[in-house]
Image (cartoon, helix red, strand yellow):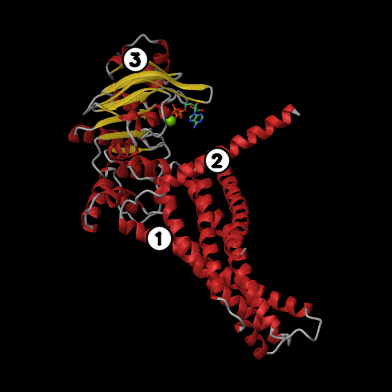
């Protein structure tokens, strides 16, 4: 019993230590950057690395997701009393509210999170971060801030693209498989459209972007050891950012829709 | 001048260096020597502040470094050039971008001026036509030389080199030693070098500190080191046949 309590206590201590360390890092990250032209170029590079490079996977997933949602909705409509436009309507709602922001960000947490953690982690174990520090560069700010800014800019755009592609995928499935007509689908996706829902999703995505990049940056930055630890850090980064993402999904939804 | 007063550092319960008192003078090449694992790298990282000391004080020309805040340390660091044991070049940048990096971050020079400076520094370490290569495309010795070029690109007041010539052929090794010693005198830098290369010790050791098991075991210059009666130091100095022969001749 006593041993168990001790274990919980030490786990709690570890969690608190990590939170403190994370907060401390963020204070270093959000200091003024060195040179504006350098900072701008870094952001452009990161938008390319983190965003544009993910466009392919985002597109594929969105189209297929939309298609599956449309088919499943149609499959569930057994009663003739439910109008055909329900398929379009439900597809739009699920895609905009949940699938595009959450699922796409989870995918990005895997792709971008592991990339950030291993890139920064490698720089840590090969002393490149020390080399930055010794030159007088604030390494946390130099390495992490451009990634956060880039993600906050580009992820919402990816998610909005994903919304269009998802709804398009739904249409493709609906018409190719003769589930509903184009007219009915169109009627569904334009029915009672509430712009606030898109706003809610974009806000969610902005928070997720910050979570993914800052947490992955944190795990990379505090890697110590060698190549093995870099791998471990990148796994931890993906797991932790996914968990935090799901958790904040609930909180934001409660705050904005609850 | 750099001075350390009673500095100690450990990891967990494990003491690595203890009570090191040293003065490194300006315009001199100061060497820290000692067997592998004796704590040279840890000592150097403590001096530059990459590791926080557990005890003691460090002065950079009468400025108490150990008590400084983030911004004060940052400004002193722009006067520091450091070459790491593993070179620590930025993999994502070319050789030119690596050497240019400090200039880009901290000066307002034009691209042309920066490029001239980069070529000058690369030439001094006997590297030419490698500007467009990435670190992964260089040999170990070339990486070290690029790292030195990057360390001196800002004309630092304080130069730190962690084993600048391990892994280099004897000729390049001498070239690097001479380069470091030359620029030290030329620009009046305070230079600290970690090494276990006896050749460097004899050639450029204006001041030598022998670290053994984390303690300062012996201090002197390159004349004194050959006829000391310190047993551990003698074991270190006369470990090779070559140096033993040298002693006999003397
Ligand atoms: N981050 C660290 N955590 C724990 N122990 C460390 C750490 N860095 C160094 N040590 C230990 O400190 C001791 C001294 O290491 P250091 O790298 O200073 O040796 P060195 O004198 O530079 O050796 P070499 O000539 O091989 O480079 C070693 O026993 C090493 O295990
Ligand atoms: Mg070492």
Secondary structure type for disc 3: helix
Ligand 2 shown in quarter: top left
Q: Chain of mark 2?
A: A
How far across and down, in percent of the image, does residue A157 sit? 49, 70
Residue A18 tag number: 2
Which residue: 64% across, 87% down? A187
Ligand 1 has an atom within 8 Å of the beta carbon of the residue at disc 2: no
How crowded pointer 1 is (Cα within 10 Å; few <14, some 14-19, many 20+) is rated as many
Residue A74: name its quadrant.
bottom right
Residue at position x 39%, y 29% from top? B46
Q: Secondary structure at mark 2?
A: helix
**Residue B92, quarter of picture:** bottom left
Q: Which residue is nearer to you in this view: A115 or B41?
A: A115
CB under 8 Å between callouts 1 and 3?
A: no
Q: Which mark is residue B247?
A: 3
Q: How many marks?
A: 3
Disc 3 from disc 2: Cα separation: 57 Å
Query: Mark 3 or mark 2, which is nearer to you?
Result: 2
Image mark 1: chain: A
- Please tell me whether residue B204 is drawn above or below residue A102 in the rendered image: above
- Percent position (x, y) of residue A21? 50, 40
- The nearer-to-camera label among 2 and 1 is 2
* Same subunit: marks 2 and 1: yes
Query: In front: mark 1 or mark 3?
Result: 1
Callout 3: 10 Å neighbours few (<14), some, many (20+)? Answer: few
Whichever of labels 2 and 1 marks the residue nearer the N terminus, that label is 2
Residue that label 1 marks: A43
What is the CA distance from the residue labelled 1 to the residue labelled 3?
Answer: 60 Å
């Amino acid at each position: 019993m006593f041993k168990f309590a001790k274990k919980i206590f030490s786990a709690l201590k570890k969690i608190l230590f990590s939170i403190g360390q994370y907060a401390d890092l963020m204070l270093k990250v959000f200091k003024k950057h060195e040179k504006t032209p350098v900072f701008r170029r870094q952001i452009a590079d990161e938008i390319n690395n983190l965003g544009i490079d993910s466009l392919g996977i985002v597109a594929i997933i969105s189209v297929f997701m939309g298609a599956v949602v449309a088919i499943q909705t149609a499959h569930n409509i057994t009663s003739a009393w439910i109008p055909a436009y329900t398929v379009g309507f439900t597809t739009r709602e699920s895609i905009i509210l949940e699938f595009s922001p959450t699922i796409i960000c989870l995918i990005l947490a895997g792709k971008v999170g592991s990339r950030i953690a291993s890139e920064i982690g490698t720089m840590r174990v090969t002393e490149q971060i020390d080399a930055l520090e010794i030159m007088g560069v604030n390494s946390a700010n130099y390495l992490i801030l451009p990634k956060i800014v880039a993600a906050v800019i580009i992820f919402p755009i990816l998610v909005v693209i994903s919304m269009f592609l998802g709804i398009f995928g739904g249409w493709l499935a609906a018409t190719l498989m003769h589930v509903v007509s184009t007219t009915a689908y169109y009627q569904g996706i334009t029915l009672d459209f509430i712009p606030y829902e898109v706003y809610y999703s974009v806000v969610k995505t902005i928070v997720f972007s910050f979570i993914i990049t800052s947490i992955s940056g944190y795990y990379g930055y505090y890697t110590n050891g060698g190549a093995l630890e870099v791998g471990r850090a990148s796994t931890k980064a993906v797991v932790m950012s996914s968990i935090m993402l799901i958790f904040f999904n609930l909180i934001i939804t409660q705050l904005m829709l609850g | 001048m750099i001075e350390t007063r009673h500095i100690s550092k450990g990891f967990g319960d494990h003491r690595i260096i203890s009570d090191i008192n040293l003065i490194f003078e300006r315009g001199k090449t100061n060497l820290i020597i000692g067997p592998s694992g004796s704590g040279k790298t840890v000592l150097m990282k403590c001096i530059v502040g990459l590791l926080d000391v557990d005890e003691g004080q460090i002065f950079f020309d009468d400025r108490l470094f150990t008590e400084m805040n983030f911004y004060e340390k940052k400004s002193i660091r722009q006067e520091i050039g450091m070459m790491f044991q593993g070179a620590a070049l930025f993999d994502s940048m070319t050789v030119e971008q690596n050497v240019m990096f400090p200039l880009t971050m901290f000066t307002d020079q034009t691209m042309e001026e920066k490029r001239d400076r980069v070529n000058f520094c690369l030439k001094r370490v006997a590297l030419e036509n490698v500007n467009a290569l990435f670190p992964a495309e260089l040999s170990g010795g070339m990486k070290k030389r690029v790292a030195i070029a990057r360390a001196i690109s800002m004309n630092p007041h304080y130069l730190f080199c962690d084993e600048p010539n391990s892994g280099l052929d004897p000729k390049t090794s001498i070239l690097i030693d001479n380069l470091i010693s030359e620029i030290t005198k030329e620009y009046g830098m305070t230079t600290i070098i970690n090494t276990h290369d006896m050749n460097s010790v004899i050639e450029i050791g204006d001041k030598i500190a022998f670290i053994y098991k984390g303690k300062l075991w012996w201090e002197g210059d390159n004349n004194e080191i050959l006829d000391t009666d310190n047993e551990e130091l003698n074991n270190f100095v006369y470990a090779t046949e070559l140096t033993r022969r040298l002693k006999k001749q003397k």
